[in-house]
Image: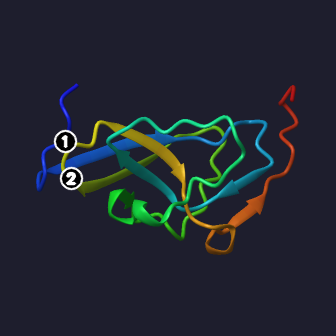
Amino acid sequence: EAPLKKGFKYCVKFNVSLSEASKYASNNIAARFTNKAYSTEAKVPMITKEMDELLMHFDNDLTIQSARYNWSEICGVYTATGGEKFITLGNFMSDEDTKYERMKKDPTSKA
């Protein structure tokens, strides 16, 4: 549970898969590193001005993650600014900067 060390490079790897009930798939899967846990009950954007240096975009910005029954590996190297203890995964780009596609309904889905 030790925080990340400034200047150190960390291998970041995780897998993503689109839910069978998802109506849309998008690109721009990223990791956000912070010193405090991110939490909100409100419907607010997760995009902030100060997050640029703590955001790690992978080489998948053009790839829409639409695999429902398979997992896609997301992998990259993050250089820590120091003190980061939490990681949040998601799409932190604006709607204008995000590519998406509407998914066809999965005939086997109960949702």
Identify residue type, mark 1. Leu
In the displayed structure, does residue 80 sit left or right of residue 48? left
Residue 41 locus on image (x, y percent): 67, 34
Q: Which is nearer the eye, 64 or 49?
A: 49
- Callout 1 touching callout 2 (CB < 8 Å): yes
Look at the image and name its color scheme: rainbow
Q: In what element is the residue under mark 1? A: loop
Residue 77 locus on image (x, y percent): 25, 55
Residue ID for mark 2:
80
Label disc, if present, on residue 4 of the rendered structure: 1
Give the crowd class for mark 1: few <14, some 14-19, many >=20 residues within 10 Å: many
- In the picture, residue 94 is in which quadrant? bottom right
Residue placed at 58% from the left, 41% from the top?
17
The CA distance from mark 1 to mark 2 is 6 Å
Residue 3 locus on image (x, y percent): 20, 36
Q: Quadrant of the N terminus?
A: top left
Q: Which is nearer the eye, 32 or 25?
A: 32
Compared to residue 43, the image places residue 96 above or below, namely: below
Residue placed at 38% from the left, 40% from the top?
87
Identify residue type, mark 2. Ala
Compared to residue 17, the image places residue 63 above or below, namely: below
Q: In what element is the residue under mark 2? A: loop
Give the crowd class for mark 2: few <14, some 14-19, many >=20 residues within 10 Å: some
Residue 71 locus on image (x, y percent): 52, 40
